[in-house]
Structures are given as C-alpha cells and as structure tokens.
Amino acid sequence: MTTLRARPLTAEAFRAFGEVIEPDNCAEIRLINNGTTTRFHDIAPVDVAAGGGHALISIFRGKPFALPLRIAMLERHPLGSQAFMPLEGRPYLVVVAPDEGGRPGAPLAFLASGAQGVSYHRGTWHHPLVALGERSDFLVVDRGGSGDNLVEFMFEQEIQITSD
C-alpha cells in the first residue's frame, strides 16, 4: 500500500488544481457598503457554463473521518468547477491528482484549516469530501444542468493518508 502524507494547504501548492478560498489568496480588496464591509473580490472563478450548465449553491454535510485514512478512488467533473467552503470552522482533508492521459497521476493530500475553502478547476481529479474529527457542513458551489459531469476512477491498490 502507498502512504501519502498530508501537508498544510497553501494557495501556491494548490494552484495547479484550483484556488484556495481565503482572504490571503485575493488579488483585489474592496471596501463596500459605505466602508463597513471588506470584499475579497473574485478569489475563485466559477466555471460551470459548459454544455449549458448553471451554478448551484448547496450544503454538503460530511461524516467525520480520522487519519490515517485509506482511499480507493478519485473523481472529477469535466463540465464545471466545484468549490467547498467549511461553515463550522473545522479542518478537512483535500486529496487531488494531476490528470495523466485521462487517469489520475500521483495524488497529493492537503490539510485544510476550517478557515480555508477550495475551488477545484474543471476536470481536476479529487477525492470526495473528507471532514475530519466531527460531522461538518460545507457550502458548495458547482454545476447543475444536463450532461454527464462525473467521472470516477478506482485505484488498483488503496492509498493510506497520514498527517505526520
């Protein structure tokens, strides 16, 4: 079995797979509402228009997991991006992989703080939601509409993820 060590999530380390949703990853900051609100503008694009898609906002409730964790699959969404933002300030695990000829390459694992969201680029291989420690709710922005927007890949051998 392959063991993969999860590392802290940073915007730079995650850039090939999408965007980290946090104020520190914002290029444009605006004061709005007569100066009472700071807007961290356009942190992550929402890419859902392929094939006539439209944006959906949902809440996903993730069952808790603990590390070490074994995973056996990754998925991707060829027609749209997908963003996750934790609502309860709890950490979670992000597992992604580059695309290598229509299959996931070597995966990477990141430990996201409860203050960081992620937005996966369209077509990015990733593991489904992994809440850590406690059941957790996430605000999710992704694609609705017609078309097959889910591809799953099963590994021949499970991958174990650790944090240290």
Image (cartoon, rainbow, N blue to C red):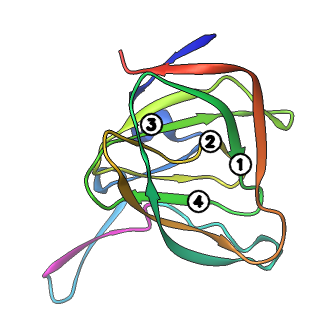
The foreground one among 26 and 56 is 56
Helix, strand or loop at disc 1? strand
Q: Is residue 51 above or below residue 118?
A: below
Asked whether, in this view, residue 2 is left or right of residue 85, the answer is right
The answer to whether marks 3 and 4 mark residues whose Cβ atoms lie closer than 8 Å is no
Image coordinates for residue 155, horizontal then vertical, percent: 75, 26
- Residue visible at 52% across and 59% down in the picture: 83
Q: In this view, does 33 lie above or below 142?
A: below
What is the number of the mark on residue 82? 4
Q: Mark 1 points at which residue?
A: 76
At label 3, which amino acid type do we have?
Glu
Asked whether, in this view, residue 106 is left or right of residue 40, the answer is right
The answer to whether marks 2 and 4 mark residues whose Cβ atoms lie closer than 8 Å is yes
In front of the other: label 3 or label 1?
A: 1
At label 4, which amino acid type do we have?
Gln
In front of the other: label 3 or label 4?
A: 4
User: Which mark sits nearer the N-terminus, 2 or 3?
Assistant: 3
* Residue 38 covered by magenta stretch: yes
Q: Quadrant of residue 34?
A: bottom left
At label 2, which amino acid type do we have?
His
Q: Name the residue under label 3.
A: 12
Q: Mark 2 points at which residue?
A: 126
